[in-house]
Amino acid sequence: MTGSADNSRRYALLLLRYRGRSEKELHERLRKKGYPAEEIETTVADLLDSGFLDDRALAENLKHQATTNKLLGFEGARRFLQLRGLSNEIIQETLAYDEDEELQNIRKLIEKKQRSISRYPEPKRTQSLMASLMRKGYSAALIRKALNNTTRGEEPEE
């Protein structure tokens, strides 16, 4: 490697030390830093070969983060992965729609949100819950199903 290529690799490894990045993210960061295109290609190819850069592993990690930590719905998780520069092919391989998991996450979010909206009158409370859950990527039909089951104090139908 030339001195400049070595610098681009060192910078890329520094970026990867902070957090996992997709190929696209790494390309963009190296380009913004001013490295030549052929050097970026060489660096990214080298990192792919050495296993430091793996979009599929990153997608699995981000899926877990989106569904477990952020409690995002299917669409929210898909958007989250897209924003990180992952290809649609990898996103489709990684994400699978699971209604039971979505209902469980909605229930957790409703419990969490109930504390902050308890002072609102009823129509405003439901409207606030719906809006909050839709921003997280849940469908309106699934939210209504969860809200109906929650107000009746029932477990969701299986």
Image: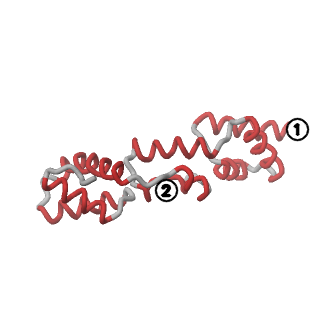
* Residue 121 point in image, percent of width and height: 11, 61
Q: Amino acid at mark 2?
A: Arg
The answer to whether residue 43 is left or right of residue 105 is right
In this figure, which colouring scheme has been used for the structure?
secondary structure
Image point 55% across, 56% down: which residue?
92
- Mark 2 crowd level (few <14, some 14–19, many ≥20, 10 Å Cα): many
Above or below — where is 99 with respect to 64? below
Quarter where residue 85 is shown: bottom right
Q: Whole-percent x and y of residue 140?
A: 31, 65
For the point 67% across and 47% down, the residue is: 26
* Three-letter residue code for mark 1: Thr
Which mark is drawn over residue 113? none
Query: Callout 1: 10 Å neighbours few (<14), some, many (20+)?
Result: few
Element at label 2: helix
53 sits left or right of 154 in the view: right
Residue 149 at x, y = what percent? 19, 55
Q: Residue 44's x, y, as percent?
A: 75, 45
Tags 2 and 1 in contact by the CB under 8 Å rule? no
The residue where tag 1 is placed is: 2
Q: Is residue 3 above or below residue 40?
A: above
Rounded to the nearest angstrom, the CA distance separating label 2 from label 1 is: 39 Å
- Label 1: state its secondary structure: loop
Residue lying furthest right = 2
**In front here: 28 or 75?**
75
Of callouts 2 and 1, which one flags the residue occurring earlier in the amino acid sequence? 1
Q: Residue at x 85, y 36 (%)?
A: 3
Which of discs 2 and 1 lies nearer the camera? The answer is 2
| Residue with the mark numbered 2 | 78
Image quarter where the N terminus lies is: top right
